[in-house]
Image: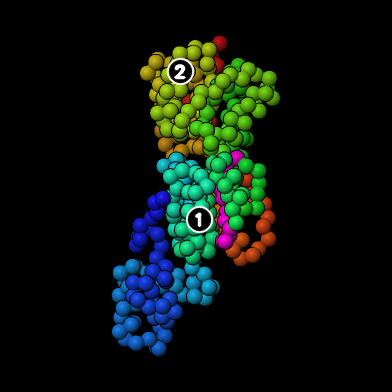
């Protein structure tokens, strides 16, 4: 496991100041709040520790008043993935707006031991609540079997609405993309799927299959990938270029779509003249692809906002209502066109 460095990364807590100064947390709180019953030598040590660790005095005062650490924990897997990075940013921003800092623990793989260790680390750090940012089928199974000491909210992409998990309607996004290609006159739509084990891969595959079934169109085997990278898309694109019958492709994310378009261009296959391509996620660079990428937009920042909002409500003992599922939007750009006669 890796975690954010301190200071400047993981937030500094009152207990950190107390340890460095060699005093109790109560003494630190007295210094922070200007109480006079602290000796000058002890006060100087505490002030020196506060300066060295860059401790936030406002957070200290609020923590004292609410009996909370004012710190939220985040367990994350695969930060380089586009959606995960944006969700993490949304969490940090919403936490900051509510006066909370965040502590990040990343896990190298999603299994029972890794998740338990990450949760134990954050609980030991006295976080007030935890958000688990690992939208994998394995993580769902592990978390359902754990007893939680603090409020926990999960990101379960493509799952039904829940009171303790934020979700997105990836299946609907795949249906919108597939429908768009069929309405352009393509006989069927092929699919470059996401890597196994990811909830998004399953949900997007489900939506693609459902839309083809509704229109009674041929379902061809999907192109399998090992990860979400452009390199995986490039390898799929080479196979697509070797099949002249393919005229429309839904790719499970924008990075892979970039690889597909690159491979097709190298083989002399025009996009969208010969093959129309739709991506997924609407990463910020998608509009600058050549051609600009038609894709499905998902609001990952909103995932972070909703996750923080819900964990704060759970911490406050409020009723656990269902969290609204975030809806997708099809963004039509230059990579799709009517099928050539």
The residue pinned by badge 2 equals 239
Residue 60 at x, y percent in the picture: 44, 72
**In this view, the mark in front (1 or 2):** 1
Question: For the magenta stretch, what is the residue range?
Answer: 148-158
Q: Quarter holding the C terminus?
A: top right
Q: Looking at the image, which residue is at 65% across and 49% down?
A: 162
Whether residue 261 is visible, yes or no, is no
Tell me if mark 1 has few (under 14), some (14-19) or many (20+) residues whose alpha carbon lies within 10 angstroms of its own.
many
User: Which image quadrant is residue 104 in?
Assistant: bottom left
Q: State if disc 2 and disc 1 touch (CB < 8 Å).
A: no
| Distance of label 1 from label 2 (alpha carbons) | 43 Å
Q: Looking at the image, which residue is at 48% across and 53% down?
A: 117
Residue 86 at x, y percent in the picture: 47, 46
Residue 279 at x, y percent in the picture: 50, 31
Q: Looking at the image, which residue is at 43% across and 45% down?
A: 108
Coloring scheme used: rainbow
Q: Residue furthest front?
A: 113
Residue 249: image tag: none
Image-based side of 154 in relation to 288, left or right: right
Q: Earlier in the sequence, mark 1 or mark 2?
A: 1
User: Which image quadrant is residue 18 in?
Assistant: bottom left
The residue pinned by badge 1 equals 119
User: 282 or 126: which is nearer to us?
Assistant: 126
Residue 122 at x, y percent in the picture: 48, 59
Whether residue 4 is visible, yes or no, is yes
> Is 133 a magenta residue?
no
* Mark 1 residue element: helix
């Amino acid at each position: 496991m890796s975690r954010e460095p301190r200071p400047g990364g993981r937030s500094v807590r009152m207990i950190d100041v107390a340890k460095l100064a060699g005093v109790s947390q109560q003494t630190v709180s007295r210094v922070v709040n200007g109480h006079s019953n602290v000796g000058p030598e002890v006060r100087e040590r505490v002030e020196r520790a506060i300066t060295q660790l860059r401790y936030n005095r406002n957070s200290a005062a609020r923590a004292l008043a609410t009996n909370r650490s004012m710190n939220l924990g985040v367990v994350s897997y695969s930060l380089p993935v586009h959606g995960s990075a944006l969700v993490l940013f949304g969490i940090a921003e919403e936490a900051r707006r509510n006066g909370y800092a965040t502590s990040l623990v990343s896990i190298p793989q999603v299994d029972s031991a890794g998740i338990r260790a990450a949760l134990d680390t954050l609980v030991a750090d006295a976080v007030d609540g935890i958000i688990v940012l690992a939208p994998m089928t394995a993580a769902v199974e592990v978390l359902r079997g754990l007893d939680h000491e603090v409020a926990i909210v999960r990101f379960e992409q493509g799952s039904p609405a829940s009171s303790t998990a934020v979700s997105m309607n990836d299946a609907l996004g795949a249906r919108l993309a597939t429908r768009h290609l069929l309405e352009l006159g393509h006989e069927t739509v092929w699919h470059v799927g996401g890597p196994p084990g990811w909830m998004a891969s399953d949900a997007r595959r489900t939506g693609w299959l459902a839309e083809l079934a509704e229109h009674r169109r041929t379902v061809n085997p999907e192109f399998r990938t090992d990860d979400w990278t452009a390199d995986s898309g490039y390898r799929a694109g080479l196979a697509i270029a070797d099949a002249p019958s393919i005229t429309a492709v839904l790719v499970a994310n924008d990075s892979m779509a970039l690889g597909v378009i690159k491979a097709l261009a190298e083989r002399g296959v025009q996009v969208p003249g010969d093959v129309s391509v739709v991506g997924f996620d609407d990463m910020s660079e998608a509009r600058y692809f050549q051609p600009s990428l038609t894709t499905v937009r998902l609001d990952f920042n909103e995932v972070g906002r909703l996750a923080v909002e819900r964990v704060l409500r759970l911490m406050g003992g409020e009723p656990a209502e269902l969290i609204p599922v975030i809806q997708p939007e099809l963004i039509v750009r230059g990579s799709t066109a009517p099928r050539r006669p």
